[in-house]
Image (cartoon, grey):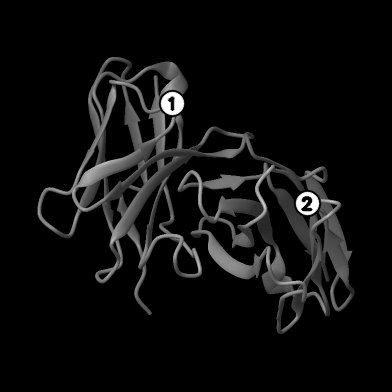
Amino acid sequence: EPEVTQTPSHQVTQMGQEVILRCVPISNHLYFYWYRQILGQKVEFLVSFYNNEISEKSEIFDDQFSVERPDGSNFTLKIRSTKLEDSAMYFCASSEGGRGNDGELFFGEGSRLTVL
Amino acid sequence: AQTVTQSQPEMSVQEAETVTLSCTYDTSESDYYLFWYKQPPSRQMILVIRQEAYKQQNATENRFSVNFQKAAKSFSLKISDSQLGDAAMYFCAYRSAYGDDKIIFGKGTRLHILP
């Protein structure tokens, strides 16, 4: 069964360093998302991506964050200069269609980011 | 703005028994989707069940069913004949049919299954 895969599963980095989290969405999916979950808190929306551009982003997704789909298969989240408060589990998700269909998102297992 | 509230951080149920997880939400929209996602330990979130707001009939998927009360903005999940494999974090989630294209999650309920 096709699934969304994420790498790395866990990354530890120093504050101020750049981090790239990678995701391979399900191959025929067109909509891509990043969510994050700070320990003990809600899963929060970061950004949605469609047709090679950001379609929506949250207030969390500031200039420190960027996304791209560099090669037609990977979908990456870059954090330019990590802060302590960026420590969280980051989930990638994809869906075949937007809300016009049943709205289901398929999630990866997550990448845990620890900023020291 | 829409919100989703799960008031039970943790619950336990005896194997083979029935358990109900609570979820309430707040929205001014009339058309939307509601979901229950399951996240087993160290695994990705998977969709358990989905409800379209315009459908009055409660969704069911095998042992999983929902009690959707649109006027009360309540969306509880009932798990019948609980199994050890049901142990997981369960997230209630909301997605607008026409507005913002994002899923809004509750904080989750961790479900323990007692053998």
- Identified at 23% across, 50% down, the residue is A75
Say which of A7 and B109 sits in front: B109
Q: Which mark is residue A60?
A: 1
| Residue B108: percent from left, percent from top | 69, 47
Instruction: Report which residue position mark 2 lands on.
Output: B23
The answer to whether A69 appears left or right of A101 in the picture is left
Q: Residue at x 27, y 18 (%)?
A: A81
Q: Is residue B101 left or right of residue A29?
A: right
In percent of width and height, residue A34 lies at 38, 44
| Quarter of the image that includes the C terminus of chain A | top left
Looking at numbered disc 1 in the image, what kind of residue is underneath it?
Ile
Name the residue at the bottom extreme. B62
From what the image shows, is residue A61 above or below residue B91?
A: above
In the image, what residue type sits under mark 2? Cys
Q: Chain of mark 2?
A: B
| Quadrant location of the N terminus of chain A in the rendered image | bottom left
- Asked which quadrant contains residue B4, the reply is top right
- The x and y percentages for residue A43 are 55, 41
Q: Position of residue A16 (x, y in %)?
A: 28, 15
Badge 2 crowding class, 10 Å Cα cut-off, few under 14, some 14 to 19, many 20 or more, is many
